[in-house]
Image (cartoon, rainbow, N blue to C red):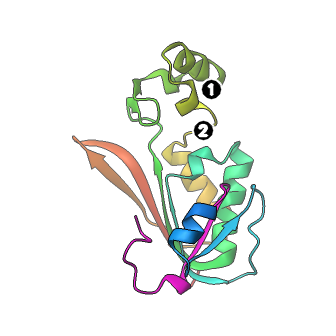
Amino acid sequence: MLLRGYEHPKSLTVLGVDDYSRLREKHPGVRFVTCRGGYFPFADDSFDICYSNAVIEHVGEREDQRQFIGEMVRVARQGFFTTPNRWLPLEVHTRLPAVHYLPRRYFWKVAQAFGRGDSARGVNLIRLGLLKKMMKCSRVKHFPIIPNRVWGMTATYSVCWTRS
């Protein structure tokens, strides 16, 4: 975990939807902020770097995902995030093959039938073309999208961006 052994914990802010009481006790120097979605509770340019790992596919509908990217760009001068590849044959949350190609309501029903409903709930995977469109809608001009491969297939995409 990023927090363990980090030399400058007071320079870190963790944003999420969870209750961070236990983590606050375990990492007293780190700032934990709970936000239920929408706009991030920070001023423009509050951070040098924003990092998000496999979160955007849980954010909600497409407009919510666009807003999430916009908020990362608004509050940080540069950033890095990852998201699973929608076209990877094995869906990484449920570990079921190809069911995520179905419309979401059927994906959830099939996942429930296999006892994986909790893993599938709220997952809205993004294809590469849509990811590019979302990034173009942000204030970012330069955003390399790096395919991360496993066994020759793109498993995730990493997006690096900077506003300068």
Q: Which residue is mark 2?
A: 124
Which residue: 49% across, 52% down? Answer: 54
- In the rendering, at what x and y percent does residue 115 appear? 50, 19
In the image, which residues are magenta?
A: 1-20
Which quadrant of the view contains residue 11?
bottom right
Q: Main secondary structure of the magenta part?
A: loop
- On whether residue 38 falls in the magenta region, the answer is no
Which residue: 75% across, 55% down? Answer: 36
Q: Which residue is mark 1?
A: 104
Q: Nearer the viewer, residue 32 or 130?
A: 32
Amino acid carrying label 2: it is Asn
Amino acid carrying label 1: it is Arg
Q: Are marks 1 and 2 in contact (CB under 8 Å)?
A: yes
- Going from N to C along the chain, the mark reached first, 1 or 2, is 1
- On whether residue 13 falls in the magenta region, the answer is yes
- In the rendering, at what x and y percent does residue 123 appear? 59, 37
Q: Is residue 5 left or right of residue 114?
A: left
Badge 1 element: helix
Which image quarter holds the N terminus? bottom left
Q: Is residue 42 left or right of residue 145?
A: right
Packing grade of label 2 (10 A; few <14, some 14-19, many >=20) is some
